[in-house]
Image: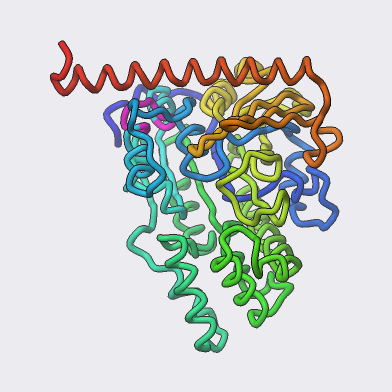
Amino acid sequence: MTDERASTTDGRNVVLLTIDSIRSDYCGFGGHDGNLTPKLDRLADDGLRFENAVAPAPATHGSATTFLTGEFPIEREGAKGSDQASMKAHIREHLSARDTVAQQFSRMGYETAAFTANPWTSRYFGFDKGFDHFEDFMDDDASEGLLKDGEQTNALSSLAVKAMNWWQGQDMFMSWEAFYDDIVAWTEEADEPYFLWVFLVDVHLPYLPPEGYRSRSRLTTYPANLALFADRGGDGLTPKFHDVLTDTYEDTIRYTDEFVGRVDRDFAGDPLMVVHGDHGEAFGDHGMYGHGRDLYEELTDVPLVVANGPEGTVEKPFSLKNLPDLLTSLAREEDYTDALDTYVFSHNRMPKVAVRGEDWKYIWQPGEDELYDLETGETVECDDPELREIGAGLIEQWHESHAERERIASAAEEVASGQRV
């Protein structure tokens, strides 16, 4: 156990369930009519549902580093880079320098654990910080199991899986069933109260639902995912496979919803359960497939539901950046409304920054800006000079705050290295 554990408290057991790449509008309570999420819909109906939950970034590495620490990552001045080595160093530096939600729960007297199937949230990047028990399955090759699930393996499927594994740069094939029993076993042995974080990748591309949840045959799903792999953005073959990709994406959501139902059924004592997406996914929206590049609603509007706690609907914007405050307030059964905002920000490293109100969004990138009325969508810009000026002003404030934090970080590193006295 970590050395930060305090004396035992009487707080609620807390389960944080992160679902990679799930869009809010693909959930029943988010407006989808395909009955993809009946278990999660029931929790939303009976619990607390956030209508305007916003991801702080359109990809896992930016979102998870933020929602586990409560702060947007910053870098030393001049240290930005788009290569993977720079990105990996960026993640490690941010996590090592900041308090994590696991550390906060440890100080509250909680035993803490995490089970993550996403390599971007592995111990390699420092995501194990503050957890008494941490499983990231980095030594397992789940793609091998995918190729041996009882169906005849052929050359195409083998090539497809190996190619898509190479594309991701890591193994993204760990199904939730592969480690569900381990999670339950830990909850049964853990000292209470406990904080548990589970990160699922079943909805993440490549979209390969297991047997029993497939609406399409592998003869179509593998070529569709390979087209997405080869295309990388949707300008070539990918649109021809649009229906296959969206069908299989829906299948993976339906499969993941079973996990939500199992947790609700199997975990003793009705723990406080918080379910959310880390970011969304694009399917030809604004000319893109996948995630990571843009800041439109299909990539930043995510589901967020609290079960076995407060009830109702929250309409004010809520940034996942405020998850640590929300989780600890709920655990103490305190007022959580301080975690709500009038407007929230999202950004990536390209750089793009968006500020979102309850029904509007302003997106900035160098030399260009966009303003949308979210009631009418993000296809035609909103003609409101006053609101555009407000959005531009908020983005300017965000840049100034971010730059100041970067200067402080650079100065602190120089002092630590002896370059400045």
Q: Position of residue 140 (x, y in %)?
A: 37, 65
Left-right relation of 360 to 266: right
Q: Position of residue 234 (x, y in %)?
A: 65, 60
The number of numbered discs placed on residues in the rendered structure image is: 0
The residue sitting at 68% across, 20% down in the picture is 391
Quarter of the image for the N terminus: give it. Answer: top left
- Find out whether residue 286 is within the magenta segment: no
The residue sitting at 38% across, 48% down in the picture is 83
In this view, which residue lies farthest toward the top? Answer: 421
| Of residues 104 and 285, the one drawn nearer to the viewer in this rendering | 285
In this view, which residue lies farthest toward the front? Answer: 367
285 versus 294 height, above or below: below
Q: Position of residue 301 (x, y in %)?
A: 69, 39
Left-right relation of 231 to 196: right
Q: Quadrant of residue 205?
A: bottom right
| Of residues 172 and 81, the one drawn nearer to the viewer in this rendering | 81
| Of residues 251 and 351, the one drawn nearer to the viewer in this rendering | 351
Tell me the colour scheme of the image.
rainbow
The reply to whether residue 307 is in sight is no
Q: Position of residue 267 (x, y in %)?
A: 57, 47
Quarter of the image for the C terminus: give it. Answer: top left
The residue sitting at 73% across, 34% down in the picture is 49
The residue sitting at 64% across, 79% down in the picture is 218
281 versus 331 height, above or below: below
Specify start and end residues of the magenta stretch as a single range: 94-102
209 versus 40 height, above or below: below
Magenta highlight: main SS: helix
The reply to whether residue 257 is in sight is yes
